[in-house]
Image (cartoon, rainbow, N blue to C red):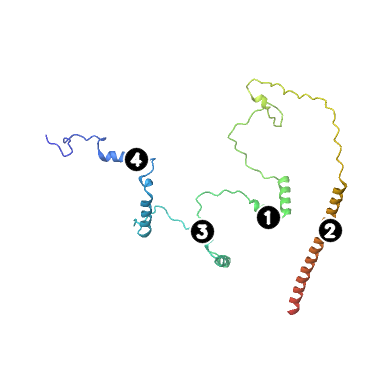
Amino acid sequence: MFSDHSGHEPGQSEPTGSHPRAQDENQDQEIQLLLSGNWNKPLWRRLLEDFRDQFSPEKLPPLHLTSRPMNVGMLQSDRLNMPWFRTIFTNLGDVISPETLPPLELESNPVDTGELISDQMSHLWLSSLLRNLADTVAPERMTPLQVTSKPMDLKSDSEFLLLPSWSATINTPKVFLPDAPKPEYSLTLPVAAPPKPKLDPAEVEFVHVLEAELRRDLRRSIFRQRLWISLAIMEVVALIGTAFVWK
């Protein structure tokens, strides 16, 4: 019998586990959680690669997009880098001749939420008063609410809602904790306050003199403040008057 170059006889099926291509596919499908080998490169090699990418970057094939690109206009970073006069001209252009945009394509069904709160607050108080009176006299008839849960039976003929006590909903036995010990009060006799020390007449005189000087300085500062404010007002009035007279 003859055999091929791989060492297997003709007609005999080759085992799947020993095929090198199948082993490579199994290895590719494994998840590699370790860092790649490029992570541990020395610093000088990474610097050389950065310089090479800067001056002679790798030529990659053109990118094939499988989705439709969306025009988002100017980026926010570009808008912030624009000078102030260009923004003024852009705003004036938008006011004078606004851009005509295509109709908006909605992919969802809109929900009628009624009138917006901002529009309701912009109305006069008379319209809101009439609306409240109309709702009181002839309220709007809504469709019956479809409830998916079963209402709770409180076993009572009363029309009011009775909430059960929290102790009635607990199935565990009740535990009564002992009261905290009350503090014992002892009768204490009031202690007389110590007598106030007598002030030195020289210190009292010094304090009075210091207070008088402080008040005098405050009166002078207030006077100077009023004087300067009056002069400033007179100067502004004089400048305005001369401006009208020269015209």
Q: Look at the image and tell me whether residue 100 can be seen.
A: no
Distance between the alpha carbons at the discs numbered 2 and 1: 58 Å
- Residue that label 2 marks: 216
**How dense is the environment of label 4, judged by Cα within 10 Å: few (below 14), some, or many (20 and up)?**
few
Spatial CA distance of label 4 from label 2 is 92 Å
Give amino acid for label 3.
Ser
Disc 1 or 4, which lies upstream in sequence?
4
| Residue located 83% across and 56% down the image | 213
Above or below, 167 relative to 77: above
Secondary structure type for disc 1: helix
Closer to viewer: mark 4 or mark 3: 3
Identified by mark 2, the residue type is Arg
Residue farthest to the bottom, as pictured: 246
Going from the N terminus, do you reach mark 2 or mark 1 first?
A: 1
Count all numbered tags in the image, as a single digit: 4
* Residue type marked 4: Gln
Q: Which residue is mark 4?
A: 29
Closer to viewer: mark 2 or mark 1: 2
What distance separates the C-alpha of mark 4 from that of mark 3? 41 Å
Locate residue 192, reporting x and y percent: 86, 33
Q: Amino acid at mark 1?
A: Ser
Q: Residue at x 87, y 50 (%)?
A: 205
- Residue at image mark 1: 122
**CB within 8 Å, label 4 to label 3:** no
Instruction: Check disc 4 and report its element: helix, strand or loop.
Output: helix
